[in-house]
Amino acid sequence: MTLPSLACPIVLAPMAGGPNTPALAAAVANAGGIGSFGFAYQSPERIAEDLAAARRLTGGALNANFFVFRPVEAPAPDVAARALATVAALPGAADVTLAVPAPPYYPDLTAQLEPVWRLRPEVLTFHFGLPPSGVIARARALGISVGITATRASEARAIAAAGADFVVAQGREAGGHCGVFTAGDPGEWLPVRELVRAVRAVTDLPVVAAGGLMTGADIRAVLSAGAEAAQLGTAFLATTESGASAAHRRYLMTERARGTVLTRGFSGRYARGIRNAFTDRVAGADVLPFPLQNTLTAPLRRAAGARDDGEYQSLWAGERYALCRGGGARELVRELLAELDAA
Ligand SMILES: Cc1cc2nc3c(=O)[nH]c(=O)nc-3n(C[C@H](O)[C@H](O)[C@H](O)COP(=O)(O)O)c2cc1C
């Protein structure tokens, strides 16, 4: 098996935390690309609802994306106390309940995959490593194509050896979490075009390129480097159909000079977002391991969302977010394809 055949080489990036609405996924799938959902922390019930809602809007290709969580040890009491104190000192913290999380620390992937086996989206992808054994074979038996994120050639080699159908080559420009297999500093992380070439050098699997792709010319550049398709996240965040928060959209469209930072402060794993008061204040502080830090900071981020405060939310965005256009997702895909033709 391989990637589903696509009339349009555009993949909507899976984006956990709300941006991937059924309307957004369907807009990209209806244009002949792949419409994705980032189901990272989602319940099986919600996964089933989203897939079914998107299926009512499109007969095109849908992708269900999951995080591969790894067993985590409880943090040492002194580290936990310092991490908690850092977050408790932030504005708005007094209004919410903050606590060091107790197990289970993350959702059960087996339960999350049940709706996938039932509803059979065309594509299933994983971030942060290889899924447990048996998952790829089961997907294949159902005709579901499996892709896994690689941030370096060694990971692409492991993905090919595991029997996946394609590699998502995520370059260092990318918004959101770095998909590196082992949590910690991403270390040597190539820009997307160089990464596509490095991945092509170690495997014949189709490559989907991701990271900082905002225009049709960007898509042309990664296709020329050997990718089959381009995965765009940030470009779709500010579209009408996106479920990103009001502050997130506003910062993407108006706070163009801020730039992005790679931070562990929100979740415990490195992720790229627009620099804000939270990323500045948590920089260098002790944090809980992923995803405990995510659970710890969730009430504070939710409260910031409710008061429309962009300084204490995670504003995930790729390095080139200043090129966000807004407007409808269908129009964006049309513009990108026209630019791709012209490039
Ligand atoms: C808001 C946001 C959330 C993301 N969540 C996920 C996710 O759940 N799963 C995943 O595989 N990638 C996730 N990513 C990374 C994207 O798959 C992709 O690598 C990235 O968006 C590409 O860079 P760009 O944002 O510059 O287009 C996320 C990216 C963003 C911006």
Image: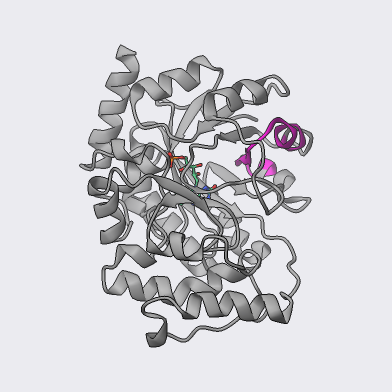
The answer to which image quadrant residue 105 occupies is: bottom right
Classify 249 as above or below 74. Answer: above
- What residue appears at the point 65 percent right and 62 percent down from the top-left corner? 109
Q: Is residue 58 visible?
A: no
Classify 123 as above or below 274. Answer: above
Count of numbered circles on the image? 0
Classify 280 as above or below 193. Answer: below
Residue 2, position in %: x, y?
62, 29
Nearest the eye: 251 or 2: 251
| Residue 119 appears left or right of 258 | right
Residue 159, position in %: x, y?
72, 37
Residue 332, position in %: x, y?
27, 34
Classify 23 as above or below 342. Answer: below
- What residue appears at the point 41 percent right and 42 percent down from the top-left corner? 233
Q: Residue 270 in magenta?
A: no
Q: Is residue 306 visible?
A: yes
| Residue 71 appears left or right of 150 | right
Which quadrant holds the C terminus? top left
Nearest the eye: 221 or 20: 221
Residue 147, position in %: x, y?
61, 39
- What residue appears at the point 66 percent right and 55 percent down from the top-left corner? 68
Nearest the eye: 249 or 262: 262
Q: Residue 154 in magenta?
A: yes
| Residue 27 appears left or right of 48 | left
Which quadrant holds the N terminus? top right
- What residue appears at the point 48 percent right and 62 percent down from the top-left corner? 48
Residue range in magenta is 140-159
